[in-house]
Image (spheres, grey):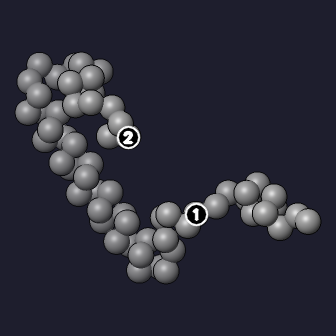
Amino acid sequence: MKGVDLETVRKLLGHRDISTTQRYLHVVDDHMAQAISKIGDLGISPSSRETKTEKKTSMEP
């Protein structure tokens, strides 16, 4: 949840019960895990991603 506490997410989403928020977050976690698995199959590491700007900057003398 990128550092945002569960109660704040619950309020933002308008859920009355925290269990509803937890249910949706579980679905998101599963989706993210599947996406990471697919990226890993391509030989791309999520932690080693760089933007074009970062690459250009690092290549300059």
**Residue type at numbered disc 2:** Lys
Q: Are marks 1 and 2 in contact (CB under 8 Å)?
A: no
Q: Whole-percent x and y of residue 28?
A: 26, 48
Residue at 17% of width from left, 33% of height from top? Answer: 21
In the image, residue 48 lies at what x, y percent? 55, 67
Spatial CA span between label 1 and label 2 = 18 Å
Mark 2 highlights which residue? Answer: 2
Please provide percent x and percent y for residue 52. Answer: 73, 59
- Splitting the image into 4 quarters, where does residue 61 fall? bottom right
Task: Name the quadrant containing residue 12.
Answer: top left
- Pointer 2: residues within 10 angstroms few (<14), some, or many (20+)? few
Q: Which residue is mark 1?
A: 49
Q: Residue furthest right?
A: 61
State whether residue 53 is above or below residue 9: below
Amino acid at the residue labelled 1: Arg
Instruction: Please give the name of the residue rendered at 11% of the width and 28% of the height, measured from the top-left corner.
Output: 18
Residue 34 seen by the camera? yes
Decide which of tag 1 and tag 2 comes sooner along the chain: 2
Above or below residue 48? Residue 9 is above
Q: Quarter of the image holding residue 58?
A: bottom right
